[in-house]
Amino acid sequence: MTIDKSFLNLENTKTSTGKNPLFFGEQLGVFDAFNNPYPELTTLDQKQRSLFWNSDEFSLVQSAADMKVADPKIVELMVRNLSFQMAADSLASGSIQELFFPVLTNHQAKKLISYHGDSEAVHEESYALIVAQCFKDPNDMYKRITNDVNILKRLKPIGNAFKQYKQIVLDNTESTLTEKRKATIKLLVSFVALEGIMFCNSFMATFALADSTGMFNGIAKRVGLIHNDEWGCHLENMMAFLNIIIKKEKWPEWREMLSEVKEILDTAVRSEESWSDSLFEGCGSVVGFNSDVLKNYGYFLSGKIYKRLGIQFDFPKVNSSPKWLENYINPNLVQSAPQEVQLGNYLTGAIANDVEEDTTFEFDL
């Protein structure tokens, strides 16, 4: 009696020696947490799981009320911005597990991507709830997403990289290992571009609208949680994979593809420059927030990614981000006091420290 190796490879011999590669090795057998050649993946998985949150984390009652009274130009800016975030998140959520699962041959990596995909689903639901609760006609929002040329233009290079990877790695059984590796590098860098540059630049616009108007706080806090996942975990997952194949498994294809890697990242940065200008078309700027502020934040984040990958950064160098962003993206500030933000729920298992310092307790031992 045998079991299909594609489901459970009981003949796998390399996992127990720690020699099974990250990609394209023997199909995995029984889960092994002991022979772990890449413990950094376990650390990253623990980190992303520690940030668990629910899609209804913050109440949207006040944000829904804000939508009804805000300047129509401000509402339009919020709609344009959320539209892209929803489309981009659906692209990531619908592809991350499907693209990686068939070729990952490391238990910790597969576990990491499993939860990565699950958290993207939470993001999707959170955006859907924002639309359902804050907009008069949710269906109109979905129509705008599918018809927005700027959204499709921004996401097309990423979608093309996903498609090319699927054709070469998943659909073509005659592709060589070198061809598969090159397509995988493009896929990983495309995810870096999406989650580390395009997502976060869009998040900043949401935070700026909330900060400059004093409105949409519930929306901004939810997007802040998504930002923490994307920049703090999902980007790091992809960077860890790249670090492993470059420095530990030493794929020679990486050096052969440096110009292509740079082009993927450059395309993302240029796309965000263009979007920063188009976002304000017909709406004008907001006090303290305009296309230049948005571009500078994009340069700030992008420069960090280029540096970590050893890629030359040919855009303006920005060394800091606006201080007020910490109100939305600092994880320590997310659990706000009830009087500051309308919360949908609270941390469970929290202990109130409401005992006076000079209180004395007596115990019979």
Image (cartoon, rainbow, N blue to C red):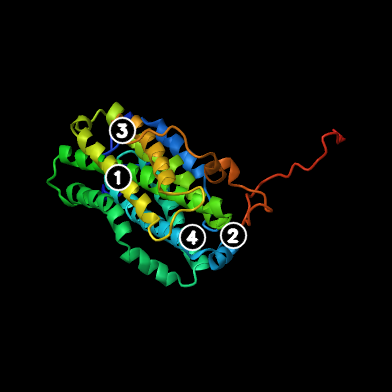
In the rendered structure, which disc, 3 or 4, sits on the residue that comes first in sequence?
Answer: 4
Residue pointed to by mark 4:
74
In the displayed structure, would residue 128 be above or below residue 253? below
In the rendered structure, which disc, 4 or 2, sits on the residue that comes first in sequence?
Answer: 2
What amino acid type is highlighted by mark number 2?
A: Ser
Secondary structure, mark 3, is loop
In the displayed structure, would residue 337 be above or below residue 299? below
Q: Are marks 2 and 3 in contact (CB under 8 Å)?
A: no
Separation of disc 1 and disc 2 at Cα? 35 Å
Q: Nearer the viewer, mark 3 or mark 4?
A: 4
Separation of disc 3 and disc 1 at Cα? 12 Å
Q: Nearer the viewer, residue 222 or 287?
A: 287
Mark 2: few/some/many CA within 10 Å (<14, 14-19, 20+): many
Secondary structure, mark 1, is helix
In the rendered structure, which disc, 2 or 3, sits on the residue that comes first in sequence?
Answer: 2
Query: Where does residue 187 sit, x and y in percent of width and height?
Result: 27, 44
Mark 1: few/some/many CA within 10 Å (<14, 14-19, 20+): some
| Disc number for residue 59 | 2
Secondary structure, mark 4, is helix
Dividing the picture into quadrants, the one containing residue 240 is top left
What amino acid type is highlighted by mark number 3?
A: Phe
What amino acid type is highlighted by mark number 4?
A: Ile
Residue pointed to by mark 1:
270
Whether residue 130 can be seen here: yes
| Disc number for residue 313 | 3
